Amino acid sequence: MVRYSAKAGVLSAIFMGLGQLYNRQVVKGILFLLAEILYIIFILPYNIESIRGLITLGDKPQEIVDGKIIQGDHSIFLMVFGIISVIVLLLFIVFYLLNIRDAIAVGKQREHGRVPAGFINSLKTASEKGFPYLFLSPAVILILFITVVPLIFGILIAFTNYSSPDHLPPRNLVDWVGFDNFINLFKLSTFSRTFFGVALWTVVWAVVSSVTAFFTGMFFAVLINSKGVAVKKFWRTIFILPWAMPGFISILIMRNMFNGQFGPINKYLQAIGLGAVPWLADKTWAKITCLLVNLWLAFPYYMAMISGVLTSISNELYEAASIEGANAVKQFTKITLPIVMYSTAPLLIMGIAHNFNNFNLIYLLTMGNPTNTSYSYAGHTDILLSWLYKLTLDQSQFHMASVVSIIIFVIVAVMSVINFSYTKSFREEDMVQ
Amino acid sequence: MSRKIIELKNLTKSYNGTKAVDNINLFIRENEFITLLGPSGCGKTTTLRMIGGFENPDSGDILFEGVRINDLPPYKRNINTIFQRYALFTHMNVYENIAFGLRIKKTPKDEMDRRIKKMLKLVELEGFEKRHVDSLSGGQQQRVAIARALVNEPKVLLLDEPLAALDLKLRKEMQIELMDMQKNVGITFIYVTHDQEEALTMSDTVVVMNNGVIQQVGSPVDIYNEPKNRFVADFIGESNILEGVMIEDYLVEFAGKKFKCVDKGFQHNEPVDVVIRPEDIDVTRREDGLLEGVVTSVVFKGVHYEMLVESNGFEYMIHSTDMQEVGSEVGLTFGPEDIHVMKREVTEIEKQG
């Protein structure tokens, strides 16, 4: 038996299309051949150049000769083009491998005595089998260049010294620094003190803000759903309003209300003879204000969710419990609470993940202030994400910002995984009928 | 006769102006299996819920062993309830469900274990302690509910259509089991159902209710054989109800003829309702019958044929194991003891007319 497949495979591996030509698929072979020739002539040189740029990040700094600026290499552009080139190269390699696989497959057909399909026919089968892929590929390519490229770019920044004032293109070049930034974040006292301080507050903030909102929501839900309350719809509508308003508007209004000098809250407090409270100026009060405002904004959401769960609990359960002698408190702790927790615990954990990154509230309310002099570029109420914002947009400390964002990503990802795999309610979500 | 354990005196309850229970009087004896029977909306569940303590009567008294318990909360009544959908705590296992009340009463661990073990043995669910109630079948959930109710050793158990959610076969089995259980445990069962067959099968006493009023109280046999009025006759089983006139004691006229009967105590020429059960009518040759008629329909029902025979403008329903052809002319016979004479109910429309 003739080993068509091996020969065709080897030929295609040597140069695209040769295997196809060997298999007597002339048109296909020529097209593949042309594809590789075009790639080598037009794209490959550019690819090699860009990938070299990605590795060196430029070696010719900007110079000023006789008062004139002579442009040097722009490290960041080189990095972006380098990443794109790597992806293009990878796509070409995938295509190359497909070409080899095709040559082998057609060779196998010939070994079994079948005549390889003509060009028109193979185009037909390709369009039938490949139809879904054909229509998926534009989206995949878009995602590659719009999502994956920036993602890789953002991660790679963490391994450079891209930052103000000494490594800011186009004036200066940026260099690869390996894991230095990660080490500095923990070892360099200015950064480590800020990182751990802000991270601690972020965790406290995320947990306390979510838990207070959750249980306040539960409190109101239970209250509204209790027997004696008339016009439940009215109360539900009233309490849902803070949530229905766009968050940033509420937050900006709150910022004015809590203003230490002109805010109506302090005016009222003074009017009834109590002193003004430094709502946003004092480091402790500012944190409490953040929690209060978040409570106001977020509890209606939990109230709505928990109301839904409560109405699904059969009244017979409470009657059955009352026969057994359970008073209102026991009925709550032994029936309402466990059933509500079963079905809403994932919401609570997602809420914590959300507040972990609740940039809007912190930045619009306090901008992270009051400033903390022992922190670098962060205030007392800054959470990791708002610190990140300041590091990049205000201070151009892109290298550290990238490190912090990678750490945030890992934390939030871990929380999500825990939520999805270990929360009992996800596995027994059909428990409440 | 054992003593009365529960007495209802002039009990009335309205919802939004509609009387759900209208001035009822009833006593229930110790160790009795009593069933409140009626169509939906007849007030049977409301009555049960008032006994259980989930509803307060508008007026009237509920006595438990002679003591008024109107104002006692449910858990102080020595009465327990089995709900229609069992109301099991789905977030707990079988053991915890049964232990719920004991834990609230802070029962010592070893006593709790002993009592729960005994209950699980009673309902034949030994070894199911750690099972999640969701993983149990409908019948098993029912048993857990019973165990949870009985572990408190109540004197009276209220059951609100407890078998309604089960399929026919399981329902029949559970009927027998509930009856056995009631005999074994020796406590009073107050049972609510709309299923007349279930009521007649299980009960010592049946209370037929309609529109919030008790229509008849009696043993299943009495209720079936001697319905007091048209509603009871119609609700309990199939019946032929005809309008007639009581000429004198032991003589009633209907369908244009006079018949001997076993009823007495009516006024002369008093209008009455006459009930003849479908299985009490025999089909004979035309010339041998008391009445003549034509068969208009025959349906096979498994055990018997259900035939409609038209005679003199009235359609008689007959249950018989012998089939007649549709269209054949037949005679109908029945004995004096098959004729049940009842006082005529004056309907609202007749009252106004």
Image (tube, coloured by chain):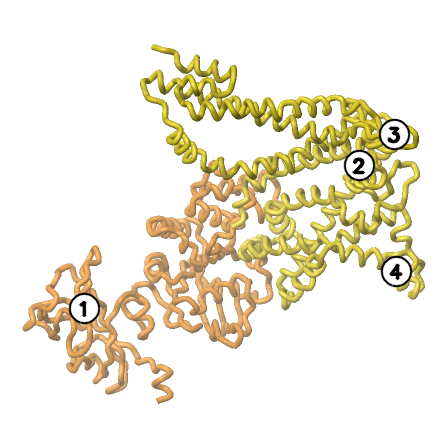
Q: Which chain is yellow?
A: A
Question: Image check: B266 left or right of B77?
Answer: left
Report which residue position mark 4 lands on. Answer: A263
**Callout in the foreground (3, 1):** 3
Question: Image check: B53 left or right of A229?
Answer: left
The image shows residue A34 at horizontal and vertical percentages of: 52, 24
Chain ID of residue with mark 4 = A
Q: Secondary structure at mark 3?
A: loop
The image shows residue B82 at horizontal and vertical percentages of: 48, 54
Report which residue position mark 2 lands on. Answer: A199
Name the amino acid, label 3. Asp
Chain ID of residue with mark 3 = A
A270 and B75: which is toward the camera: A270
Residue, x 37% and y 59% (percent of image)?
Answer: B203
Name the amino acid, label 1. Leu
Q: Secondary structure at mark 2?
A: helix
Picture layout, residue B29 above or below residue A35? below
Report which residue position mark 1 lands on. Answer: B308
Residue, x 30% and y 70% (percent of image)?
Answer: B234
Q: CA distance from mark 3 to mark 1?
A: 106 Å
A302 and B153: which is toward the camera: A302
**Does residue A273 appear in this view?**
yes
Q: CA distance from mark 4 to mark 1?
A: 88 Å
